[in-house]
Image: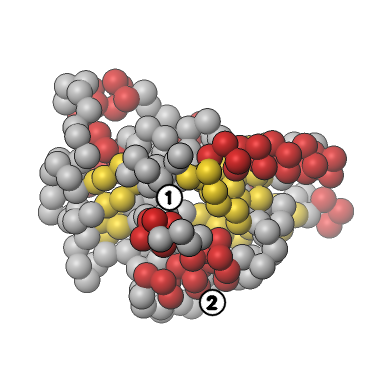
Amino acid sequence: MSKTFFIDLTKCTACRGCQVACKQWKKLPAEETENWGSHQNPKDLSGITLKLVRFQEVGTSPDDMQWLFFPEQCRHCVEPPCLDAMTVPGSIVHDQETGAVVYTDLTAKEADKEAFAMSCPYDIPRINKETGQVVKCDMCVDRVKAGLLPACVQTCPTGAMNFGDREEMLALAEKRLEAAQQKYPDAELVDADSVRVIYLAQTDPDSYHEYMSASLSPRGPLTRKQFLAKLGRPVKRMTS
């Protein structure tokens, strides 16, 4: 049975343990950061930062201010549009056992950068400047297949991050949503039907980040037929 993350943002304290755990497990170097007026650092995902806790402060008065924390990562789409942007067969694998979308040896030279930019409504893939590889979260598929939790889930101290069989996570998401709506009437599950990383947002997804939801993304969700038409490709799935 395929796997799914459920991330309850009402329980996230922005400790950034998940962000650090990702770097430790993947043996990724630290980013050179600077004070840019936010507790969020670095500013964005990169070729060496595959998970990032985003910070937003929203509200119009002291009485309605909210701190919003968003641990961002690849959503591991149920129907991954990046597969259709792949030009080298086998460079992206959609693992059927876990549902993980894994970039195996995808380089910037092989990838059509414009196609990748169009393909992901969540603006996730990045290029590692040292290796030239196109990279993103791979669901810690090596850990998962060994019976372990993803590193980010393992380290979460508040129960914000959860991982397991998809039906189990969907049931947990619905239960947590019902509870959250008692305090946050606008709470919702983000893109739950189409991704394997489901967020419970306490308010409008666009308050967290412009690319949080595919339906609100500046790129807008394209149907697969529309996307391939823009690339000038036939509507036929490339094998992974």
Which of 212/24 is in front?
Answer: 24
Q: Are marks 2 and 1 in contact (CB under 8 Å)?
A: no
Query: Which of the two residues, 140 or 223, is positioned nearer the viewer here?
Result: 140
- Which residue is denoted by mark 1 in the rendering? 74
- The quarter in which the N terminus is drawn is top left
Q: Is residue 43 left or right of residue 92?
A: right
Label 2 vs 1, first from the N-terminus: 2
Q: Residue at x 21, y 21 (%)?
A: 235
* Label 2 – label 1 distance at C-alpha: 26 Å
Dividing the picture into quadrants, the one containing residue 95 is top left
* Location of residue 173 in the rendering, given as x and y in whole percent from the top left corner: 66, 41
The answer to whether 136 is drawn above or below residue 228 in the figure is: below
Above or below — where is 166 with respect to 102? above
Residue 2 shows in the view:
yes
Q: Secondary structure at mark 2?
A: loop
Q: Quadrant of the C terminus?
A: top left
**Horizontal and vertical percent position of residue 155:** 57, 69
Please give the name of the residue rendered at 45% of the width and 41% of the height, measured from the top-left corner: 2
- Looking at the rendered structure, the secondary structure element under dot 1 is loop
Q: Which residue is mark 2?
A: 35
Residue at the spot 49% in from the left edge and 65% down from the top edge: 151
Q: Nearer the viewer, mark 2 or mark 1?
A: 1
Structure colour scheme: secondary structure
Residue under the point 51% across and 55% down:
72
Residue 175 is situated, as x and y percent measured from the top left of the image, at: 73, 39
**How many other residues sit within 10 Å of disc 2, few (<14), some (14-19) or many (≥20)?**
few
Amino acid type shown at disc 1: Cys
* Quarter assignment of residue 122: top left
- Who is closer to the viewer here, 216 or 53? 53
For badge 2, the amino acid type reads Asn
Residue 166 position within the rendered picture, expressed as x and y whole percent measured from the top left: 53, 40
156, above or below 166, in the image:
below
